Amino acid sequence: MQVSSAELLAAARSYQCAVGAFNIYNLEGVKAVIGAAEALHSPVVLQIHPAALTFGERPLIALCLAAADQATVPVSIHLDHCSSADAISLALEAGMRSIMVDGSQLDYEANRSFTSEQTAQIHTRGGVVEAELGRISGSEDGLSVPEREARMTDPILAADYVAQTGVDMLAVCIGNVHGRYRGEVQFDFGRLAAIRKSVSIPLVLHGTSGVPNELVRRCIDLGVCKFNVNTELREAYMNVLRQTHHDLIDVMTAAVAAMQAVVSEKLRLFNSVGLADALSK
Ligand SMILES: [Zn+2]
């Protein structure tokens, strides 16, 4: 069944776990995520990146909505990292009601005004908004430690940002990066705790591929209730393509199985197994 991201994150928060938000690009991705969620009685977020939306357009959204409606567990459909007002309008028109408004490339004032404007529009349509303060770097960016720290979320500014924009979930930067980590993962947990104190809305963490399990659990303890997962699913799919198959259905079936294994492992790590049953009570 289709539910609001806000409802999922609120449930995760009260049960001290986190919801997995998995980036999908096609039918195989959708089948893998929902297959794992149903088998483990966990809610999930099906997440579409704007690059996938540019490719799949409205039929991709329709696929996700239809799959969510048919699922035996709660599913929300979320638009990831969207910095384009046009793409936000398209997503709303096509029935999406959970959107990450990404103004993180802008300076603080411009981020705040872009996010406020888009949030008002999304709220009018009954949707919810994730936004990012600070800026999540890519593992390929090759930033120095001071450069990375300058991009981290400021707890004091976060309180102002959330109050001024009215967003519903906040993606934080505490040393997390998109893609694969090079070297040891170093999260600023003091900063995460300070952000948790200064804002009351649910917190989101991007860039969890390759993060040791104990660090992920510590993030959950400190209030993160949504994790984005993209890189590991893509890798699982790409690995299948490198194997020899003689039939297209075999490729698709193997891709679903490989991605479903990744999703299942994450749902266990995020401790959301069984949460669907708690939600339906
Ligand atoms: Zn991200």
Image (tube, helix red, strand yellow):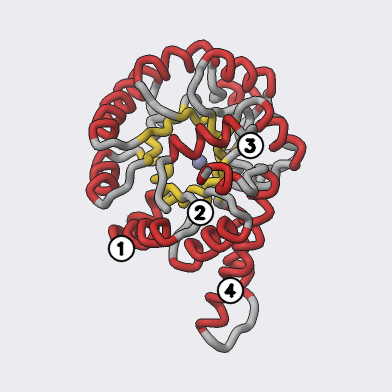
Residue placed under numbered mark 3 in the picture: 17
- The amino acid type found where label 2 is placed reads Val
Dot 1 or dot 4: first in sequence order is 1
- Residue bearing mark 1: 59
Percent coordinates x, y for residue 61 in the rendering? 34, 56
Left or right position of 51 against 205: left
Which marked residue is nearer to the observer: mark 4 or mark 3?
3
Residue topped by disc 4: 241
Compared with 59, 177 (above or below) is above
Mark 1 vs 2, N-terminal side: 1
- Residue drawn at (46%, 50%) of the image: 75
Total labels: the figure holds 4
Instruction: Specify the quadrant of the image occupied by residue 26.
Output: bottom left
Q: Earlier in the sequence, mark 1 or mark 3?
A: 3
Q: Residue at x 37, y 40 (%)?
A: 99
Q: What residue is shown with label 2?
A: 73
- Amino acid beneath label 1: Pro
Of tags 2 and 4, which is closer to the observer?
2
Distance of mark 4 from mark 3, alpha carbons? Answer: 33 Å
Residue type of the residue flagged with mark 3: Cys
Measure the C-alpha gap from mark 2 to mark 4: 29 Å
Give the CA separation, mark 1 to mark 4: 24 Å
Residue 178 seen anywhere in this rendered image of the structure: no
